[in-house]
Image: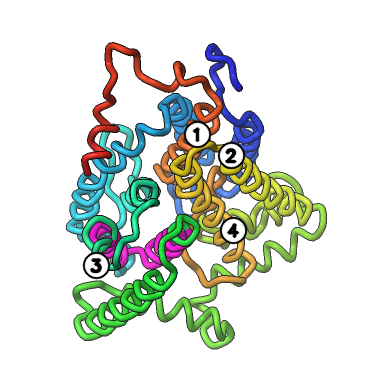
Amino acid sequence: MQSNQSIFRGDLVLWGVLALLALFSFFPVFSASSNLSYVVGNGTPWQHLFKHTFILVMGFIIMLGVHRIPHHYFKGISILMLPVVILLLLYTATQGTVIGGANASRWIRLPIVGISFQTSTLASVVLMMYAAHYLDKTKHLQQAFQETLIPLWLPVGIILGLILPSNLSTAVIVFFMLSVLLFFGGYPWRQLLLVWGMGAVVFLLFFLTAKAFPEAVPNRIDTWVSRIENFREPSQNSDANYQVERAKIAIATGGVSGLGVGKSVMKNFLPQSSSDFIFAIIVEEFGLLGGFIVIFLYLLVLFRIMVIVHRSATPYAKLLVMAVGLPVVFQAFINIGVAVNIFPVTGQTLPMVSSGGTAAWMTCIAFGIVLSVSAHEDAPVAETSLPSEYPNNPLDVLSETL
């Protein structure tokens, strides 16, 4: 148990691993950002490093704040945030952003700090939190499938339906991780298979509709098809396979020990070298040894998540940790898999390492929740409950009512 006066509560090993990933990220981000500076002509490497520093510092401040919140408060928070993220997704979809002729309606820009905010990342965290609360609330109930449609699958369908047109990979990953959570949370597997079947039908209808009316979703369907076909037979379209081929060259060039910090060559030819394909730059500069160390750190994060799940005393705490912690680790290995050509290109970043916008903040919120569970599950009741003059937490009342 951590001292009540300690700044860092909860699992100190997890704190340390996250700090190591964040500190290590400065090397590849600073090196890879030279591509944005000298090839694309977007700022200087120092400007990109300052932006990355600002995002990570703010992220750890957010993590510190979130991990101080008793984890049972997140039941009510998830319910309150559901309509908020739905409205944000609707607003984002109406922006009609097009980059290079393709639909890129994923971001809204925060005018004060000048950072793009990808609303789907916040929506995915909120949705997983809500699912954990739903599973905890209904764990002793034998519900028919139709009884779960409105309280569970309606918000899931709305949120994933709003994410899907502009970000297929995120929608698929969230749906997969939600299914994993529901399976471990005791949701009937037959009903889950039924939902997968219904989801496949809905996606097929969306695909056929988008092919029939391509102006509704500019170029996204073609992009999806191109990525999958290029992954299956990369030799047929070298242009579409440009990033993957350059990433493979970077990994092969790195060898065992790497070229050295800042000495990457492929960063000048890899368009997403500081974000989606940063793992390739890590291996090129730090070698297979550096790549294996990064993989080991993510495996250590996964191990600590499982330790926290095992130590948690309540079903809700276990579910909440899995809901927000596992998707981050899963995303990390998706990113690594894309870089080594195990998976088709998805656009998923490497958590706590890649440069970018507020996706890092959503990751920090997720780990703040995990650390909140590890900090408060072992704490005395007096540390996690409200004072006696405030016996009813409004968020708990709201979550129990709904």
Kind of residue indicated by mark 1: Val
Name which residue type carries label 3: Gln
Q: Say whether marks 1 and 2 touch (CB < 8 Å).
A: yes
Specify whether 360 is left or right of 12.
left
Left/right of residue 142 with respect to residue 235 in the rendered view = left
CA gap, disc 4 to disc 2? 21 Å
Placement of 112 over or under 278, stated as above or below:
above
Badge 1 is on which residue?
A: 373
| Residue 242 visible in the picture | yes
| Along the line of sight, the residue nearer the viewer: 339 or 245 | 339
User: For the residue marked with disc 4, what is the amino acid?
Assistant: Phe
User: What whole-number distance in Å separates the C-alpha atoms at marks 1 and 3?
Assistant: 32 Å
Q: Which residue is mark 2?
A: 308
Q: Residue at x 42, y 28 (%)?
A: 70
- Mark nearer the viewer, 4 or 3: 3
**Mark 4 or mark 3: which comes first in sequence?**
3
Instruction: Give me the residue at 55% from left, 61% from top.
Output: 334
For image coordinates 66% across by 33% down, the residue present is 13
Which residue is depicted at the point 40% across and 42% down? Answer: 358
What secondary structure is found at the residue carrying circle 1?
A: helix
Locate residue 104, reporting x and y percent: 31, 61
Q: Give the label on residue 146, or none.
A: 3
Question: Rounded to the nearest whole Å, what is the CA distance between mark 4 and mark 3?
Answer: 35 Å
Q: Residues within 10 Å of mark 2 (few under 14, many from 20)?
A: many
Disc 1 or 2, which lies upstream in sequence?
A: 2
Mark 4 vs mark 2: which is more N-terminal? 2
**Which residue is tagged 4?**
333
Q: Please, is residue 299 above or below residue 93 in the view?
A: above
How crowded pointer 3 is (Cα within 10 Å; few <14, some 14-19, many 20+) is rated as few
